[in-house]
Image (spheres, rainbow, N blue to C red):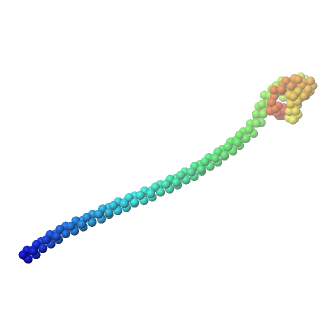
Amino acid sequence: MKKLTVLSVVAASLLLIGCGQEKAEQTKTEVATPAKTETVAEKATKAVEATKEAATAAIEKTTQVAKDAKESVAQTATKAVEATKEAATVAVEKTAQVAKDIKEAVAPKAEEAVAPKAFAKCAGCHGKDGKMKALGKSEIIAGQSKADLVKKIGEYKAGTRNAVGMGALMKGQVSALSDADIDAIATYVSGLK
């Protein structure tokens, strides 16, 4: 019986050892699996963090590029506005100079063109060259100074001059003349020789 007891104890021990190994392997597997799961979770967390960092860096870089582009566009626009203002100023100055040159070139000719037309009324009595005494009474007007002519015509227009009884007639002739017309006629007549 001793042998049987020893054998029973040995068999039980082997069974227990076998069960213990299975249990040990099962425990070992259970312990290893969470470790593997944690490793995968850690890797996923690290991947998410790396993606966040890359996205943040990309956003920062894009923001900086946009800021630089905005500054560049603003500088370019400012330069374009300044260049346009400068070009406009130059154009205005050139236009003003051309207008002045044209005025200087045309003004004397305009006076010459206006004066003979305005003088047409005068020529009826004073002659086309201003060397005829009007109605045989007045003085010859050709060659008189411009200042004297402006003064005399102005006096006739105002009704304060009545040389040789011609005041009323002359007032009727010059009453519609503007100061510019009087000046042009006086300029023209003073140049007649």
Which sits in the foreground, 114 or 49? 49
Considering the image in quadrants, where does the C terminus appear? Answer: top right
Name the residue: 68% across, 42% down: 95
Q: Quadrant of residue 177?
A: top right
Residue sitting farthest toward the bottom: 2
Residue sitting farthest toward the right: 164
Name the residue: 50% across, 53% down: 66
Q: Is residue 149 visible?
A: no
Q: What x and y, as percent, mark residue 104?
A: 75, 39
Which sits in the foreground, 151 or 128? 151
Q: What x and y, as percent, mark residue 15?
A: 14, 69
Which sits in the foreground, 68 or 92? 68
Considering the image in quadrants, where does the N terminus appear? Answer: bottom left
Left or right placement of residue 4 versus residue 112 in this view: left
20 versus 176 height, above or below: below
Q: What x and y, as percent, mark residue 117?
A: 78, 28
Name the residue: 40% across, 58% down: 51
Left or right placement of residue 119 versus residue 41 in this view: right
Q: What x and y, as percent, mark residue 41?
A: 33, 61
151 versus 58 height, above or below: above
Q: Quadrant of residue 119?
A: top right
Name the residue: 22% across, 68% down: 24
